[in-house]
Amino acid sequence: TVDVVIESAYWNPASIRRTSKHLGIVTDASQRFERGADPESIPYALDRSTQLIMELAGGTLLKGMIDVYPKKIREQLVPLRPTRVNVVLGTSLAEKEMVGCLKRLEIKPVAKAGAAIKVRVPSFRVDLKREIDLIEEIARVHGYDRITDKTTSTVDFSRPFQDGSRRDMIRDILIGLGFHEGMSNSMQDSRRVELSGVHAVRIMNPLGAETAFMRTSLVPGLLDSAARNQSFGITDVRLFEVGHVFFAGTVEQKTFVSGIVEEERVGILMMGLTTPRHWSVPGRQMDVFDLKGEIEALVARCALDKCRFISYSTTDTLADNQIRVEINDTYAGYFGRVKKEVREMFGLHHEAYVAELDLLSLDSGGQKKYEPLPRFPRVRRDVAFIVDSTVTAERIEEVMKETGSALLQLVEVFDVYDGENLPVGKKSLAFSLEIMSREKTLTEAEIETEVKRIVKKVEGAFGASLRSS
């Protein structure tokens, strides 16, 4: 060998890790570069190896070096809050002492940024990326033996964390309503993620085709659990899950991060009989109204008042006859019956009903307030209107509530009829009105005045006519 060319290189840790795993080759070099190396040490490594060759073998050194460095890796700037250091370590170190500990490791302060210090991390310390990493280095240099033991925590646990308390509250409510909590994999196959009708997020290095995408809905996981229960002979299922879903987003969405939206939701599934089998009670299969009632109970227990249910069309292919759920005039989720083809895909033999709600929409931010029991009796009056078949009961109910005075306590629709003895294109909607005063017992004249005002307003707003009994 007469001519020797020396190459020294820095390799991307992620690329080395993927290649080593794909080929099944693990070497000392691959392990070293997987953990990260110092790109700025390349010239020094070349100079040192050249020096050793010249000393041991002699020869002539040619001038110059070919350097291919497409994008220089800059040293990181990491913010450090002195107050945070003392909270985590339980110390009372001065800012000057902290900076002194870091300088001994060639980590130098650059500038002040409010209550934080920006420090420059040298390129050879690839393990220092976050504030907590710097805190660990300060503790190590300062000396673990110099940190005194404390019997009290520096973290305040006197109040529950907001996010955790909301989740726990939802779990407690649903368990109290007779549901069991499930937990499914957040990674699913392409068939499952496509059911929700949104663009799924593909995982770069999936373990297999069945875990190649991040889930876009909690419902497929609940259906898998229901199918698993069915295989063990359990067909009466009430399940829920609290978890995150992921899908491709747009810049208009508040949670937009690198093209991915992450939402926390609660999913609910009901299937089978409404009550346990017993000779004294005839069995009845669950229907969509049972699920609607459970959602209303959940919303009420969360101290939320205004909840609406609206039929709507969607690209979601999980359920048919979907109902949109709005809480305080904001979209909160949906519920409906699982489509037949979806049930067959999961191998379910019975009708299943599912709901998916945004967890944030169930956060009222308030507390339930005690109201004293009424001292005076409620009076109930039933009224039925003949209206166009396109008019919804909800619209009439809204007008009734707006028209009624403080005496009107409750409006409920209890009957819908569109059969014989009605003109074509008409239907009958019957409502129950509960009227009460908190100050006195109402007279018949006062009750009739309240009812007549409401009836007159409905007749004028919808061209309705009062139906005789």
Image: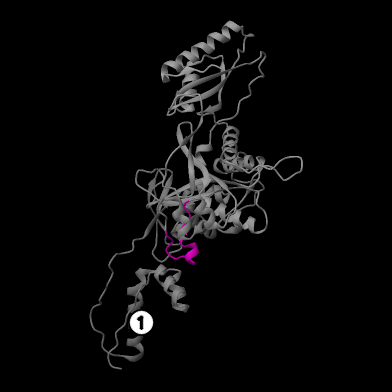
In the displayed orientation, state which residue is furthest to the left: 63
Residue at left 51%, top 27%? 420
| Residue 362, horizontal then vertical, whole percent | 53, 37
Residue 267 seen from this side: no
Q: Is the residue 110 above or below the residue 468 in the image?
A: below
Using a 10 Å C-alpha cutoff, classify the residue at mark 1 as few (fewer than 14 neighbours), some (14 to 19) or many (20 or more).
few
Q: Of residues 64 and 239, which is closer to you in this image?
A: 239
Name the residue furthest right.
Answer: 279
- Pinpoint residue 110: horizontal percent, then vertical percent: 37, 53
Q: Which of 57 and 454 is in front in this view?
A: 454
How many labels were placed on the picture?
A: 1
**Colouring mode (rainbow / by chain / secondary structure / one colour):** one colour
Q: Looking at the figure, which quarter contains the C terminus?
A: top right
Q: Give coordinates of residue 68: x percent, y percent.
A: 27, 72
Rendered position, 185 above or below 29: above
Q: Residue at x 49, y 52 (%)?
A: 97
> Does residue 336 lie above or below 381 as drawn?
below
Which region shows up in magenta? 202-216
In the rendered image, the quadrant that contains the N terminus is bottom left
Q: Where is residue 387 in the image (x, y as percent from the top left)?
A: 45, 23
- Choose top left, top right, bottom left or bottom right for residue 312: top left
At x 23%, y 81%, the residue is 63
- 203 part of magenta stretch: yes
Tell me if I can see residue 103 in this picture. Answer: yes
What predominant SS class does the magenta segment belong to?
A: loop
Q: For this view, does 183 lie left or right of residue 399? A: right
Residue extending farthest bottom: 1
- Identified by mark 1, the residue type is Ser
Question: Helix, strand or loop at disc 1?
Answer: helix
Residue labelled with disc 1: 49
Q: Which of 13 and 409 is in front in this view?
A: 409
Q: Is residue 135 left or right of residue 147?
A: left
